[in-house]
Image: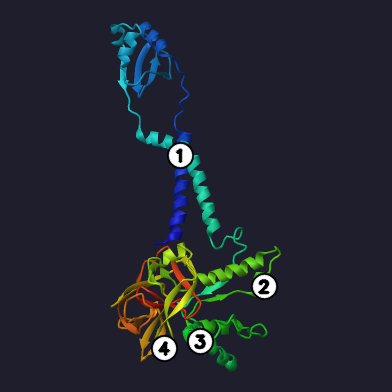
């Protein structure tokens, strides 16, 4: 479905309704008729100067001899006109001399009149809605000057790899370790290595610094943000810093996450959903985690994050199922060793690490849950993730998963 066409079609529909209502209001016959009282009408009937009376929902149109336009009067609804005139002293024989008819109003004309009265309100609401949608758009320059202008390149499309970069063999060799860390950070953390804060690439313009950085993201299969340093510099104080913060917020929103009803096993025996942990701001609690040698240890939760859901995958195993974003990593047994595989790259028949005994005790060995089904499903509103002090994996729905 073309959402852009739908938005424009809604605006065009409002414009069409406004034009139709304006046309009917301009070209409908004028109703500047002279109004008279009902007692005056009764007097005219007695005098015999009334030729015809048309009744329309309590409104009376009176045609007198010598008048080209009707005169308007009103009677009480639900009461017969004949009875009303008789009560006003009109003789019965005089009533028989005039023509009395009933006219029903056009429902279409009533709707047009009603629409014309509500049209200004509808127009104001539509204008407000249009301005709000424009303000929320990514291209709105009036309200988004503090947002980062970084361009995102995801791994859903063909990406640049080291094979596309030539002439910097030494730099590529140095960056292979960074790629390895991005793909399998668990083995570095197990050795006590610290997460690198960044890599400084130095060189004249046009030597391929951005291309090399994009190749690192392509080799690791992670999203890549690209922005020029000059875009952080503005004449307004604080705008550059705001864009830096927004850039990091965008990067965090692309971290792997789980759905809110995912059950998290705590080391003290409790089982909570990850949404409950987010709502209760549960930090400092201990959760089961898996070590590099396939043993169960403990890690401390230092934060619980939430973000909108870009995509969602459902993984069904012999020990339960779990729903995670496509970039979420799972410990999978392949060729006799543990490797971290993205949710959107899992296959039926793979084995995901799971506790041998499905209990809340933080001990025991690792077993393996066989994948029976992997499918992409409709995204939810929000997804969640735990931030741990070490090991970077936790137990969710009886399966070990990698955290951000």
Badge 1 is on which residue? 21
Q: Which label is found at residue 293?
A: 4
Quarter of the view holding residue 91: top left
What separation in Å lies between label 4 and label 2 (alpha carbons)?
Answer: 47 Å
Q: Earlier in the sequence, mark 1 or mark 4?
A: 1
Tags 1 and 3 touching, CB below 8 Å: no
Which type of secondary structure does the marked residue at label 2 adopt?
Answer: helix
Which type of secondary structure does the marked residue at label 4 adopt?
Answer: loop
Q: Is residue 76 above or below residue 200?
A: above
- Mark 3 surroundings: few (<14), some (14-19) or many (≥20) residues within 10 A: some
Q: Give coordinates of residue 118: x percent, y percent.
A: 46, 38
For the N terminus, give its image quadrant.
bottom left
Residue drawn at (63%, 86%), measured in percent from left and top? 207
Q: Which mark is in front, 2 or 1?
A: 2
Badge 3 is on which residue? 188
Q: How is the image coloured?
A: rainbow
What separation in Å lies between label 2 and label 1 (alpha carbons)?
Answer: 52 Å
Q: Which mark is in front, 2 or 3?
A: 3
Q: Which mark is in front, 1 or 4?
A: 4
Badge 2 is on which residue? 230
Q: Is residue 237 above or below residue 266?
A: above
What separation in Å lies between label 2 and label 3 (alpha carbons)?
Answer: 34 Å
Residue drawn at (63%, 84%), measured in percent from left and top? 201
């Amino acid at each position: 479905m073309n959402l852009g066409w739908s938005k424009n079609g809604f605006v065009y529909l409002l414009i069409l309704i406004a034009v139709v209502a304006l046309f009917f209001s301009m070209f409908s016959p004028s109703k500047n008729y002279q109004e008279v009282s009902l007692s005056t009408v009764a007097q005219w009937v007695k005098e015999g100067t009334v030729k015809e009376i048309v009744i329309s929902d309590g409104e009376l149109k009176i045609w007198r001899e010598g008048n080209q336009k009707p005169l308007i009067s009103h009677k009480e609804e639900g009461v017969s006109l004949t009875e009303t005139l008789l009560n006003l002293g009109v003789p019965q024989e005089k009533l028989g001399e005039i023509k009395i008819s009933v006219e029903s109003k056009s429902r279409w004309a009533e709707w047009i009149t009603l629409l014309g009265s509500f049209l200004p309100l509808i127009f104001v609401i539509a204008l407000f809605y249009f301005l709000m949608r424009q303000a929320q758009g990514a291209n709105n320059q009036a309200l988004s000057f503090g947002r980062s202008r970084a361009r995102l390149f995801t791994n859903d499309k063909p990406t640049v790899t080291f094979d596309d970069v030539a002439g910097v063999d030494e730099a590529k060799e140095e960056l292979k370790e960074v790629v390895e860390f991005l793909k399998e950070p668990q083995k570095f953390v197990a050795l006590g290595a610290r997460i690198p804060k960044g890599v400084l690439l130095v060189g004249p313009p046009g030597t391929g610094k951005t291309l090399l950085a994009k190749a690192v993201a392509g080799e690791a299969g992670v999203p890549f943000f690209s922005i020029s340093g000059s875009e952080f510099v503005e004449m307004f104080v604080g705008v550059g810093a705001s864009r830096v913060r927004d850039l990091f917020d965008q990067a965090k929103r692309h971290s792997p996450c789980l759905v809110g009803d995912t059950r998290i096993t705590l080391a003290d025996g409790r089982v909570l959903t990850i949404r409950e942990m987010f709502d209760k701001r549960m930090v400092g609690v201990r959760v089961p985690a898996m070590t590099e040698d396939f043993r169960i240890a403990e890690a401390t939760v230092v934060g619980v994050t939430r973000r909108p859901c870009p995509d969602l995958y459902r993984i069904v195993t012999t020990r339960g199922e779990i729903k995670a974003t496509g970039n979420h990593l799972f410990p999978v047994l392949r060729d006799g060793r543990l490797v971290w595989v993205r949710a959107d790259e899992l296959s039926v028949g793979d084995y995901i690490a799971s506790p041998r005994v499905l209990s809340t005790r933080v001990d025991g060995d690792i077993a393996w849950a066989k994948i029976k089904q992997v499918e992409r499903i409709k995204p939810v509103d929000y997804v969640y993730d735990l931030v741990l002090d070490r090991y970077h994996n936790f137990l969710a729905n009886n399966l070990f998963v990698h955290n951000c």
